[in-house]
Image (spheres, helix red, strand yellow):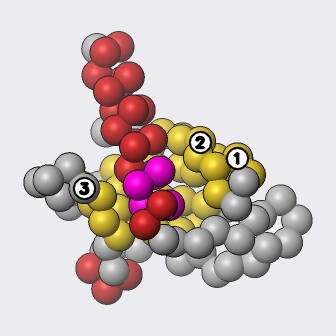
Amino acid sequence: MEPFNIKITSQNQPIVLTVLPTDKGYYKVIYFGAILAALKQQESNIWELIEREEMEAGDLPYYLPNAAGDRIEIILDQKFVADVGAAIEAEIAQLNQAI
């Protein structure tokens, strides 16, 4: 599956994230060219954060928080995970309909 963009709201501001699906069953979430987080959907359809030690960064650096310029501070809490997971599900459903 190819990378795709999603849009969520964080800190009451819209942000665009790039999602990189992996063959390991999780999705890397990219913000400003760096890995912000990785998420995996459990069998119960609940999304969870993947620990850095459990994922392969590849060529990308890990995101270092810096709320300067166009960046906003993103809190990796359960709301963030649920919002990103829902956006990933919606994008995949839309891609599947196009096939």
Rendered image: mark on residue 7? 2
Give the position of the C terminus as an image quadrant: top left
- Image coordinates of residue 75 in percent, x first then y, are 59, 72
Other-residue count near label 1 (Cα within 10 Å), few / some / many at <14 / 14–19 / ≥20:
few
**Residue 43, above or below 2:** below
Secondary structure under the numbered disc 2 in the rendered image = strand
Q: Secondary structure at mark 1?
A: strand
Residue 72 spot, x, y in % from top left? 75, 65
Could one spot residue 58 in this view of the protein?
Answer: no
Magenta-drawn stretch contains 6: no
Q: Residue at x 68, y 79 (%)?
A: 65
Q: Which residues are magenta?
A: 80-84
Q: Specify the amino acid type for callout 3.
A: Ile
The residue furthest left is 43
Q: Quadrant of the N terminus?
A: top left
Measuring 27% from the left and 79% from the top, which residue is drawn there? 54
Please report contact status of discs 3 and 2: CB closer than 8 Å, yes or no.
no
The disc at residue 14 is 1
Residue 35 in the image: above or below residue 6: below
Q: Residue at x 35, y 62 (%)?
A: 39
Q: Inspect the image, locate mark 1, and give the three-letter code of the amino acid beneath it.
A: Pro
Look at the numbered discs 2 and 1 and tell me whether their residues touch, using CB distance below 8 Å: yes
Q: Which SS does the magenta portion mostly show?
A: helix
What is the C-alpha distance between the residues marked 1 and 3? 23 Å
Q: CA distance from mark 2 to mark 1?
A: 7 Å
* Quadrant position of residue 68: bottom right
